[in-house]
């Protein structure tokens, strides 16, 4: 049964934990294993770990670090970054990763999605959609890959259908222009993708408060809402403090 989820997102760069803004200007925020231990105590719904160095550099996942994170996690774990073969997907699942997010390869070698879904189950394959505003008036969306560095010439709806054609079990959607800004989610982007897919959707990018998350739950009922900054920063000076809503707060937000 599908349920609403509030999911922290951790960005790994060369083994350390960072937070970006518009996929740039990474700010060091700590050690990933210590952060996972804190999130365990806070009983988070799910955890997404994205290796941004593997994504940009097209290098393999850091198997040792992923193994350590998976062993430490007491919540469902989704990993993305550098995944470009079915064997890599199978290795990640064997390490204890529950879901594997595929970004670059979903564009360059989409048959990996189909073959991986056959191997480990469709429910374990997440397709990543990162978009940037494009066009003269910046009113159009274009999907980007390789950490936002390469444009695909496909829009968000085309790419959603592309991912579903190859058999993803879930979509992770993000507006790169809102990454780390804490200015709120892109409501038009979310609505247009939500109305054109038949798989679960998790949205990421722009959350500035728990009210932003609550608004999406009120509007869409069953949706995954992911965030980075609000779960690693605190206050106007953005001091690093790992946080997550209490069970009481979650019930108020979801209901």
Image (cartoon, rainbow, N blue to C red):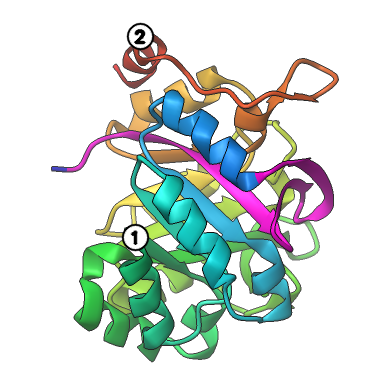
Q: Residues within 10 Å of mark 1 (few under 14, many from 20)?
A: some
Which mark is on residue 133? none
Would you name the residue on which mark 2 appears?
248
| Mark 1 vs mark 2, CA separation in Å | 29 Å
Locate residue 175, reporting x and y percent. Answer: 62, 52
Q: Do the residues labelled 1 and 2 touch (CB within 8 Å)?
A: no
Residue shown at 44% from the left, 46% from the top = 72
Q: How crowded is mark 2: few (under 14 residues within 10 Å), some or many (20 or more)?
A: few
The stretch in magenta equals: 2-31
Q: Nearer the viewer, residue 90 or 104?
A: 90
Residue shown at 29% from the left, 64% from the top = 124
Q: Eyeballing the image, is 126 above or below 38?
A: below
Residue shown at 50% from the left, 56% from the top = 68
Locate residue 155, reporting x and y percent. Answer: 55, 69
Identify the secondary structure beneath mark 2: helix
Screen quadrant of the N terminus: top left
Q: Is residue 227 left or right of residue 164?
A: right
Which mark is on residue 96? 1
């Amino acid at each position: 049964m599908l349920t609403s989820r509030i999911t922290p997102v951790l960005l790994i760069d060369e083994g350390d934990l960072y937070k970006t803004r518009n996929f740039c200007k990474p700010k060091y925020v700590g050690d990933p294993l210590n952060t996972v231990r804190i999130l365990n105590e806070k009983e988070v719904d799910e955890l997404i770990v994205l290796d941004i160095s593997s994504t940009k550099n097209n290098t393999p996942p850091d198997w040792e670090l992923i193994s350590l994170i998976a062993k430490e996690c007491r919540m469902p774990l989704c990993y993305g970054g550098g995944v470009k073969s079915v064997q890599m997907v199978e290795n990640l699942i064997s390490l204890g990763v529950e879901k594997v997010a595929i970004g670059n390869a979903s564009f360059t070698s989409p048959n990996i999605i189909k073959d991986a879904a056959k191997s480990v189950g469709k429910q374990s394959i997440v397709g990543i959609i990162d978009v940037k505003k494009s066009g003269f008036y910046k009113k159009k969306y274009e999907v980007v890959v390789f950490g936002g560095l390469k444009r695909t010439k496909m829009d968000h709806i085309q790419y959603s259908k592309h991912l579903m054609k190859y058999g993803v079990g879930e979509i992770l959607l993000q507006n790169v222009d809102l990454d780390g800004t804490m200015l709120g989610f892109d409501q038009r982007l979310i609505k247009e993708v939500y109305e054109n897919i038949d798989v679960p959707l998790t949205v990421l990018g722009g959350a500035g408060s728990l009210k932003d998350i609550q608004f999406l739950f009120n509007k869409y009922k069953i949706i995954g809402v992911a965030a980075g900054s609000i779960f690693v920063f605190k206050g106007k000076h953005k001091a690093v403090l790992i946080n997550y809503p209490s069970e009481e707060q979650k019930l108020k937000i979801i209901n």
